[in-house]
Amino acid sequence: MGKYLQNLEDLKKSEIGILDFIEKLAEENDLEYFLGYGSLLGAVRHQGFIPWDDDIDILVPRASYEKMRVLLQYSERYKIVSIHNDPEYIHSFMKIIDTYTVLEEEGMENLNQYGAFVDVFPLDGAPENKLLRRFHCWLIRKVSNAIAHSGPKTHSAGSDSKIKREAGVWLRNHYESFVLPKIVGRYDAKTSEYLGDLVGGSVAYPREVFDGVAYGEFEGKKYRIPYGYDEYLSVKYGNYMELPPVDQRVSRHKFSLYYK
């Protein structure tokens, strides 16, 4: 295939292709997932992408997240990129990428060049006690930020501090043996009364927010959303049906997309 520049609509189509693949994978393997963040907001408020947004985020309960990570090892086109399989990756959540594309994003110059992607955030457990829950969420966010600092200084999250970078590298290198079992997974997501996208959002919600599945329209198709989407969006965005000021309706990403 030739390599040529694509536009924003082509990027969105590639991301929808990944989302369709995830839906099929979930259906065939009894996996749970939900649209999350701006993708959930877009489904509820716009029935698709937020007009000035250009990415897709999903939330996946930890058990399904780990199962998905294993299953994607055998996929030909769509692959997982995560802290577990890429020594230069600096996020505590994973991406599902379309390997038929190449995405060059500003601020990522010194990292591997990935394809169009969907961000996949695990839903992890949190304690019932309010003070412990706040501390747990804070700690996970600190660890996630430290790992992000392990990237090169030219990366948007990279740090000028050698100590911060070395601490982040240690946490990244010991994610499987220490961070995941001792910190992120300290409270079992299967039995905890609170769940949250803690590595990305630092907020835990009552379990019932994610206990049921509804379906929301997104770009002409139906995808899974949390039954408690109203509480999720209200906590995250306040009056989420109100549009932001015009000067805030801008994309956060600058990219070039190519087909291989």
Image (cartoon, rainbow, N blue to C red):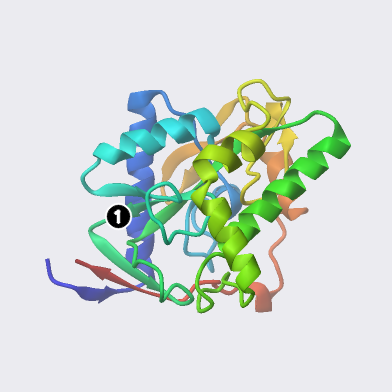
Question: Which amino acid, by three-letter code, is at mark 1?
Answer: Asp
Q: Which of 212 and 99 is in front in this view?
A: 99
Q: Can residue 149 be seen in this view?
A: no
For the point 37% across and 40% down, the residue is: 22
Q: Can residue 130 be seen in this view?
A: yes
Where does label 1 land, which residue?
98
Q: Quarter-wise, where is residue 204 in the image?
A: top right
Q: Count residues near mark 1 (Cα–Cα under 10 Å), then give few for <14, some for 14-19, many for 20+.
A: many
* 122 vs 102: above or below: above
* 258 vs 138: above or below: below
Residue sitting at the far top: 191
Q: Nearer the viewer, residue 83 or 227?
A: 83
Q: Quarter-wise, where is residue 241 in the image?
A: bottom right
Q: Quarter-wise, where is residue 31 in the image?
A: top left
* 12 vs 178: above or below: below
Q: In which quarter of the image is the C terminus?
A: bottom left
Secondary structure, mark 1, is strand
Question: Could you say where residue 99 lies in the image, as x and y percent from the top left?
Answer: 26, 56
Question: Could you say where residue 117 lies in the image, as x and y percent from the top left?
Answer: 39, 56
Question: Could you say where residue 94 lies in the image, as x and y percent from the top left?
Answer: 46, 49
Q: Which of 50 and 15 is in front in this view?
A: 15
Residue sitting at the far left: 1
